[in-house]
Image (cartoon, rainbow, N blue to C red):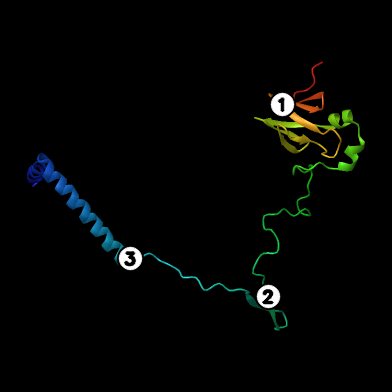
Amino acid sequence: MHSKLKRTWHKITADKRRFGLFCTLLFVGLLLWARIIVIARPARTAIAEPYIETAVATILSSDNKTTKVFLESEPMKNPFSVDSEIFPLLTPSTDNTMPDGQKIEKMSENDIVRSFRLEAVMGKLAMINGQVVKIGDIVGSKTVQEPLRLIDVHGRTVIISAGARRYELSIAPLRQ
């Protein structure tokens, strides 16, 4: 039996046309076989009910009186927001707003620059006091006469200018 299979295999593979025809017929046979399997066992499907505008649910209370509850069609609260009572904010916000804008305007330019803290540098972006700025952006208060602009970012330092005056902020500690 084994030698018969070997001879048949050599006959089929000896001629390229016969072997190509054999492979094509085998492929078509497998496709038809797979189709029969799919028809015999169809995929499980579910059909949804039509969209309901307002859902109504009845809740039984302890004294067996029914109470109707009307649910909103859209959520009233963002499910991804963090509850400030459960998780209080311990660090200042980084939502690109400067806190206490009125106090900064009354400060001198040197005091404003001293209050800046360079937190991170990445490429041509810098984070100063929780505010993400890129080259050309105004740093701090925008209502002062000569706003402070970020003009250069390199390594762990940034250069801020107000007119002809230049200030350098660095993440590295001061060298003494």
Q: Residue at x 24, y 59 (%)?
A: 33
- x%, y% of residue 31? 25, 56
* Residue 168: percent from left, percent from top: 78, 24
- Which of 17/3 is in front? 17
Residues at marks 1 and 2, CA–CA distance in whole angstroms: 58 Å
On the image, the x and y values in percent for residue 132 come to: 72, 37
Q: Quadrant of residue 67?
A: bottom right
- The kind of residue tagged 2 is Phe
Label 1 crowding class (10 Å Cα cut-off): few <14, some 14-19, many 20+? some
Crowd band around label 3 with a 10 angstrom C-alpha radius: few (<14), some (14–19), many (20+): few
Q: Which residue is mark 2?
A: 70
Furthest residue in direction right, as rendered:
106
Farthest residue toward the top? 176
Please say if 95 is above or below 34.
Answer: above
> Between 95 and 150, which is closer to the camera in this rendering?
150
The amino acid type of the residue labelled 1 equals: Asp
Left or right of 71 on screen, residue 35: left
Of the 4 image quadrants, the one containing the C terminus is top right
SS for tag 2?
strand
Q: Nearer the viewer, mark 1 or mark 3?
A: 1
Using the image, determine if residue 37 lies above or below residue 165. below
- Secondary structure category for the residue under label 1: strand
Mark 2 / mark 3, whichever is N-terminal: 3
Which callout, 2 or 3, points to the residue nearer the camera?
Answer: 2
Tag shown at residue 41: 3
Which sits earlier in the primary sequence, circle 1 or circle 2?
2
Q: Which residue is mark 1?
A: 152
- Identify which residue is drawn at 67% across, 58% down: 79
